[in-house]
Amino acid sequence: MALDGNAIGGLLLEIFAVDMTSADATCAACGAVRSVAETMVYFRGPGTVVRCRSCTSVLMVISRVRGLNCVDLSGIEALRVRAASA
Amino acid sequence: MAGTAVRGRLIWQVATVATVTDETDAVRTIALDLPDWPGHHAGQHLDVRLTAEDGYSAERSYSIASADGEPVAITVERLDDGEVSPYLTQELRPGDQMEVRGPIGNWFTWGPHDGGPLLLIAGGSGVVPLRAILRHRQRSGSSVPARLLYSSRSLEDVIYREELDQYRGSAEVRYTLTRRQPPGWGGFAGRVDGAMLARIAWPASQRPLAFICGPTPFVEAVAELLVARRYPESRVKTERFGGA
């Protein structure tokens, strides 16, 4: 069963070093813009699969291989991330 | 500088269990002593990592149960087929240590500046981050109106009942009991449905801010009902959890 992007907040913070749950992601397939927190997240299979809640296309796949986080972002057309405050 | 965490970086740190408090038969609150905790906001969560002597490790996410400025506490529900929760709810003792990283997530959070009126809808242990929000609202003296609708199997399964009932002076707290109701029960019974929300949900015209937390099917059903009541999707914040 799918969880949501809140569930990978820690993993994404580890990779991007900023909070990504509140970032807006534009789906490359359907153009929907939603918070990463609202995506559908599946932990089954070899990695973590993040899908668009509007059209279910794959937005992002994260797999951990021998100590490396491999991130496929090809399903995301654009990311808007809040800039760190001074 | 040695020992200084780089701001914004997420690092594992060692937490020491300060106290454990049984909330229900299956649910326990664990207060943690975290010397390097940077502070958190109501609604955020943290990751816990447990490592066995043979090196096998397991990670889980738990909502933070305490309000902004309070010591970190998590509330954990025991899942009998779980790998981590039986240990946390049955074997963990004060003084024990575990690895923790956080706080995590700035989306499912609330502070007084976010306004309201607040509609908080919890399924089971989904009440944990919503309790942090209610607690923060109370401690910050916020006058934002708030309503909590909490769906629980039975009255005995209601987490934080004593505390939630104390909020009744300033917030509306309603329970719906899905499996078993005590004799003479005057609250809601059964799953959250449209009729229940018609009685408890603020009208969309008041621009309410909704937070829903619970198992995935619960959250999806309630979010759909709120959108049907013309709540804009941007004002409906959701957090889903699954057992492990």
Image: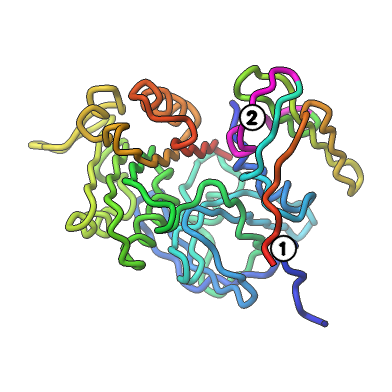
Name the quadrant containing residue A54. Answer: top right
The answer as to whether the residues below labels 1 and 2 share one chain is no
Q: Tag 1: residue type?
A: Gly
B148 w.r.t. B132: above or below: above
| Circle 2 chain | A
Percent from the top left, x then y, of residue B110? 45, 53
Q: Residue at x 63, y 56 (%)?
A: B48
- For disc 1, the neighbor class at 10 Å (few under 14, some 14 to 19, many from 20) is some
Q: State the residue position of label 2.
A: A33
Q: Secondary structure at mark 1?
A: loop
Q: Is residue B138 magenta?
A: no
Q: Is residue B45 left or right of residue A75?
A: left
Circle 2 SS class = strand
Determine the residue positioned at 32% across, 55% down: B160
Numbered range of the magenta stretch = A29-45
Percent across and percent down for residue B95 are: 56, 75
